Image (tube, rainbow, N blue to C red):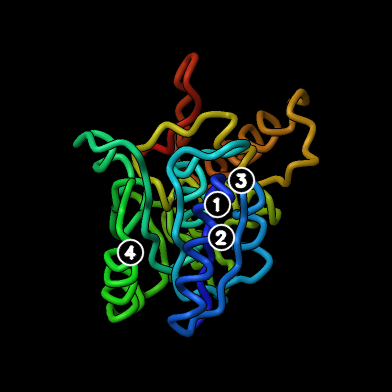
């Protein structure tokens, strides 16, 4: 089984890697969130589990976990953090983590929690996503509004898929950028706004009135 450890503390990451390898796992290590997400995307569905620190440079653990789930990655996530507040635990679980382990921890407990996660049936990937009158098939890449087919570009499709996987959430410009573009993306351009505008127009033309709400100062939300 292959495990990805995303942890910026090099000593801890090396210790966890060594321990897991002694348990018989193949282990990759990323020292920041961006690197971790790139490994997940490059080895799509290749990891059996991800051990993910909450506080990471470049992209924090919550953002990494949300992006993984938005991209359809189904591997169980064990989130590590030095924080022990209820709000932090709930935040991690709401972002898509499967379990939560507070630092400092004994390696034996981490290994036991990992084994428990690996025994769980892998969550079935969503094939058809829908909110209200909008339906998206992630296998066939078909989109329908009120039963009428809508033709989208690949970026528009991924943008709509992101909205559908996070219903009722306000998605900031940065969240959309981090989920749909790589780190070479020019964050100063208006490309996000252009794609939002084009997607909104196509959904409206198919009969969905005012489908994407602009939340001033916060981002965008797909209406039900």
What residue sits right under mark 4 in the picture? 110
- Mark in front: 3 vs 4: 4
User: Label 4 crowding class (10 Å Cα cut-off): few <14, some 14-19, many 20+?
Assistant: some
> At numbered mark 1, what does the secondary structure look like: helix, strand or loop?
helix
What residue sits right under mark 1 in the picture? 11
Compared with 80, 143 (above or below) is below
- What is the number of the mark on residue 32? 3
Residue 62 in picture, x, y percent from top left:
43, 42
Q: CA distance from mark 4 to mark 1?
A: 16 Å
Screen quadrant of the C terminus: top left
Q: Residue at 56% x, 66% y: name it.
A: 142
Q: Is residue 161 among the parts visible in the rendering?
A: no
Q: Earlier in the sequence, mark 3 or mark 1?
A: 1
What residue sits right under mark 2 in the picture? 14
> At numbered mark 2, what does the secondary structure look like: helix, strand or loop?
helix
Q: CA distance from mark 3 to mark 1?
A: 14 Å
Task: Give the image quarter of residue 191.
Answer: top right
Q: Depth check: 85 or 211 in front?
A: 85
Task: Give the image quarter of residue 14.
Answer: bottom right
Compared with 220, 198 (above or below) is below
- Mark in front: 4 vs 1: 1
Residue 215 in picture, x, y percent from top left:
45, 21
User: Label 2 crowding class (10 Å Cα cut-off): few <14, some 14-19, many 20+?
Assistant: some
- Mark in front: 3 vs 2: 2
């Amino acid at each position: 089984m292959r495990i990805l450890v995303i942890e910026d503390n090099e000593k801890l990451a090396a210790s966890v890697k060594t321990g897991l390898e002694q348990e018989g796992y193949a282990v990759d290590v990323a020292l920041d969130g961006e690197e971790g997400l790139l490994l997940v995307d490059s080895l799509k569905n290749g990891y059996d589990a991800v051990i993910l620190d909450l506080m990471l440079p470049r992209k924090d653990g919550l953002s990494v976990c949300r992006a993984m789930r938005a991209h359809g990655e189904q591997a169980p996530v064990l989130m590590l953090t030095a924080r022990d507040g209820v709000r932090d635990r709930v935040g991690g679980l709401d972002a898509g983590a499967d379990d939560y382990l507070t630092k400092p921890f004994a390696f034996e407990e981490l290994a036991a929690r990992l084994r428990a996660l690996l025994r769980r049936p892998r969550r079935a990937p969503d094939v058809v996503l829908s909110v209200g009158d909008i339906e998206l098939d992630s296998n066939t890449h078909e989109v329908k509004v009120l039963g009428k087919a809508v033709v989208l570009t690949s970026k528009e499709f991924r943008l709509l898929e992101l909205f559908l996987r996070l219903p009722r959430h306000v998605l900031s410009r940065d969240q959309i950028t981090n989920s749909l573009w790589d780190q070479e993306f020019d964050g100063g351009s208006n490309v996000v706004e252009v794609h939002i505008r084009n997607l909104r127009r196509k959904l409206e033309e198919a009969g969905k009135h005012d489908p994407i709400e602009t939340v001033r100062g916060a981002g965008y939300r797909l209406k039900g």
